[in-house]
Amino acid sequence: MSTIIVRVALPRPVEDPFHYEVPPHLAGKVTRGSIVHVPFGKRTMTGVVVDLVESSPVPTRSIVALSEGPSLSRELVDLAQWTASYYQSPGGLLLRLALPPSGVSGKGPKFVLTESGRQALEKGQSLHREILETLKRGPRTTTMLTERFDSAQLEAGVSEGLVAPALSPAPTNTIPSSSYRREEIPVGKLTLPQEEALSRISDGVSGERFEVILLKGVTGSGKTEVYLRAALHTIGLGKRVLLLVPEISLTPLLVSRLEGVAAGEVATLHSGMSDAERTNSWEAVRRGQAKLVVGVRSGVFAPIPNLGLIIVDEEHDTSFRQEDTPSYNARDVAVKRGQLEKVPVVLGSATPSFESWYNASEGKYHLALLPHRVTPAADPDLLLIDMSDPAQTDFDYPALSVALRDELTGVIERGEQAMLFLNRRGLAPFLLCPDCRHTVPCPNCSVTLTYHANRKAVCHYCGHKQDPPDQCPDCGSRKLGPVGTGTQGVEKGLKELFPGVAVDRLDRDALGKKGALEGIYRRMDSGETTILVGTQMLAKGHDFPNVTLAGILSAEQALDLPDFRSGERTFQIITQVAGRAGRGERPGKVVIQTFTPDHYAITTALSGDHEAFYSAEIETRRILGYPPFGRMGRIILDGANEEKVTSAAFTLTGQLPTRKDNRILGPAPAPLVKIRNRYRWHILVLTKNHRELVKILHAARKVDVPGVRVTTRVDPVQLL
Ligand code: ADP
Ligand code: ZN
Ligand code: ZN
């Protein structure tokens, strides 16, 4: 009998899968999509069978065990392979996202003695005696066994049927409930635009038809209500729903609303869970117990049987893009998944990404508009403050304009609430010497250290922490001190300006302890907090009806970044933050502080004129050949030796197989030229089509310079 060989994708940063032999006792049971445990070096790893082949070019070892329970579907393996090829990412690392954490990074499956193993031991068989003796004392993990015994011995024990992987227990509690809840107010009739959007989606679900529906509506226009009803419709047909959100921990309200519609059938998948919790959720997902699966970007690979609908909320959010290996954009992978599974995909946003908007305007996506808020509140009043106006500035509190302080006073007097947004953590962004303009850089990175409330100077890229020098390292001046304001600085200033008023802060530094976020929400929801200061986390879809004032402290901040999407980001962030104010009965006000009041991203956001913004932006991109008019790739070179990296960047650029209609920008030092003591250069590649781009990036990865790492990215979002 000829042996069967399979190729198994393993969680290794390599392009190709590995060959393994199917042992006789697993013959016929191992298929494409099977989750298998295989020996790899001295360890055992979990991987996914991607295909069955005639023979292997290399000597092979045998599969140790087949994971019981359902395999991954053909569509899911296809999806991972498509993603690997499109983004030029390692397929095994992508497929790992479809597996539970314990099967990968944990200690592997547990093994037990089988009945024949027990008999063999009693009969005194000497073969594998030690391993059988060990297992007689109880189940052991793969790691433990392969540390003590040769993994070939384990393989042999398994293939002779003396040893077998233990059955994993069925999941117990499928729903890790959010501890934050609020009374659900039942919604009566949908508005006409909501009805239209819903029936379009529902028809697609019933007809098992792939279509992308771009659901565009301002915050409060009832998008979530449409998701919930579409989900109910899908579940009613016995199908399942996948909902992707940028960050689950930031949307406790959404999760509790979902539990309202599908109590006991919602599973969440995100990184804030323990391995055990995630494994539990994953089991509930792949066994079909979860009807509604809510996940962050990696959730796009969740093994959901009989999928009927995919929803991507806040589709413009850049956290759907995974920049690290394996890189992919979950929003775009979700669209591909919809196509493979023949289900509709809903992309929802108040400020759609440029790419999605373009696809809708080209007729590739169906545009469903929710033009108005459903709540009675009028559109908020917008107030643009030019920060270069001396009448607005106060030397002691440079981040807070006079106008904003007046508005805050009003909010406090009326017993309302305010949210202030500043995308910069810490007390102050710099330590600056006023005598020689010296700033204190991180010793490992090309950024300045941020001054934090604990009197430490901190690097936001590598985590380096130090006491601030008490005198200027350059000129010896003793006047070196913090300059500018971060979220901690705003919090401190507000507490001085408004003594006795409850000021709270939401940023990464405030979320150190478990439950911190729930606390911030609860205090906000109960009205205990009057002013909430925060980073972009604030802009993500919270609904606090008593918030009547939203402030953007530095609206031009994103514009300073060397990124062709900075205008888009600025437009989005202003629109999103503006949506925070006046969601309840009372009218809202938005104060936008900026040094560049005339920039088109700011003026169009202010007038709420998306069309004007998109048409201004589209001309720039058309002329420059930027996405969506061309394909963009990025080649990053990094290494410990600056000269080596620099010369490698020039050499590599000279070797790229480019054609006349391709454009190569660079090489140039990356905007962040040093991170963690590694020097970085980059090259941007613009091509007419994806195939050309892949060819060029592939050639770049083949260039081998000792001490220099070459990384490539397709459709990069992060250009720093
Ligand atoms: P979005 O997701 O666009 O921000 P939501 O779906 O959260 O909007 O709706 C905003 C608020 O309006 C919610 O409190 C929701 O319950 C309510 N709502 C939504 N649709 C309707 C409707 N048709 N009638 C009454 N209230 C609605
Ligand atoms: Zn100095
Ligand atoms: Zn650093």
Image (cartoon, rainbow, N blue to C red):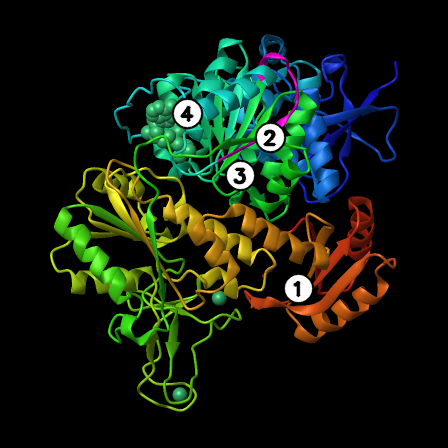
Are the residues at dot 4 and dot 1 in contact (C-beta closer than 8 Å)? Answer: no
**Magenta residues, start to end:** 205-216
Q: Label 4 belongs to which residue?
A: 225
Q: Which mark sits nearer the N-terminus, 2 or 4? A: 4
Magenta stretch holds residue 105: no
Queried whether the magenta region covers residue 211, the answer comes back as yes
Which amino acid type corresponds to the residue marked 2 in the rendered image?
Phe
Mark 1 vs mark 2: in front: 2
Sooner in the amino-acid sequence: mark 3 or mark 2 = 2
Q: Nearer the viewer, residue 47 or 608?
A: 608
Cα distance between the residues tagged 3 and 1: 31 Å
Whether residue 440 sits left or right of residue 590 in the image: it is right
* In this rendering, position of residue 713 left or right of residue 182: right
From the Cβ of disc 4, is ligand 1 less than 8 Å away?
yes
Can residue 127 be seen from the camera position used here? no
Residue contact at pointers 1 and 2, CB within 8 angstroms: no
Q: Give the Cα distance between marks 3 and 2.
A: 17 Å
Q: Quadrant of the C terminus?
A: bottom right
Gap between marks 4 and 1 measured at Cα: 47 Å
Which residue position is annotated with label 2? 301
**Vertical placement of 24 versus 400: above or below?**
above
Callout 1, which amino acid? Asp
Mark 3: amino acid: Glu
